[in-house]
Image (cartoon, rainbow, N blue to C red):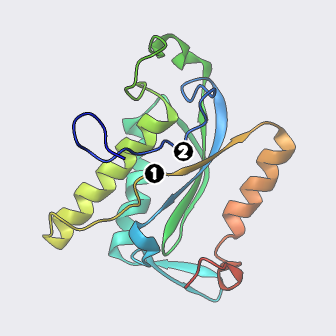
Amino acid sequence: MKTSTGLPYRRSVRLPKVDYAAAGRWMITICTFRRQHIFGKITNGVIELNLLGKIAALQWEASRLLRPEIELDEWTVMPNHLHGIVFIPDSNLETRPASGVTVRPARSLGSFVAGYKAAVTSAIRAEMHDTRFKVWQDSFHEHGIRSMHALDRLRIYVRENPIRWLEDPENI
């Protein structure tokens, strides 16, 4: 199916009644294009980042300064994805758009991820001297964290992700 402009229609994977600019904690997963192992390798349960993986890690850390509306928690860069726990504090509530607006709200989870992905893509393309290199899949996965127990469990999951790498069915 195509839109009125002739572009292919893309179905949003975001939940329709969730306010992604509201205060909350989120676990996000961002996968590389075609889940290619471009960020490094796992050896004995430890991630060994290559240059591209170091760029992804440095840009994640730079997000603390560039995007102060988002607080970073536990995170890890894997060979073909990134897991991160982020917190959106209450101070963002006044920036939400009016209902019916189809643009990504400023200071939202989607805005944060888009900015991060763009920064990593730009830096990697410059490093590789390849303006067409595809770094990321188009979207990202998110999971709302609703309790401290869930937060603690997800922190362990993120921290131990490299240890479980060989058990991951997506690790091909």
The kind of residue on which mark 1 rests is Ser
Residue positioned 39% across, 67% down in the render: 33
* Image quarter of residue 144: top right
Q: Residue furthest right?
A: 149
Residue positioned 46% across, 10% down in the render: 98
Distance between the alpha carbons at the discs numbered 1 and 2: 8 Å
Badge 1 is on which residue?
139
Q: Is residue 62 above or below residue 69?
A: below
Question: Badges 1 and 2: C-beta atoms under 8 Å apart?
Answer: yes
The kind of residue on which mark 2 rests is Val
Q: Residues within 10 Å of mark 2 (few under 14, many from 20)?
A: few
Q: Quadrant of the C terminus?
A: bottom right
Q: Earlier in the sequence, mark 1 or mark 2?
A: 2
Badge 2 is on which residue?
13
Q: Is residue 118 above or below residue 102?
A: below
* Image quarter of residue 42: bottom right
Q: Nearer the viewer, residue 158 or 18?
A: 18
Q: Nearer the viewer, mark 1 or mark 2?
A: 2
* Image position, residue 34 (x, y; %): 42, 72
Q: Residues within 10 Å of mark 1 (few under 14, many from 20)?
A: some
Tell me: 101 left or right of 167: left
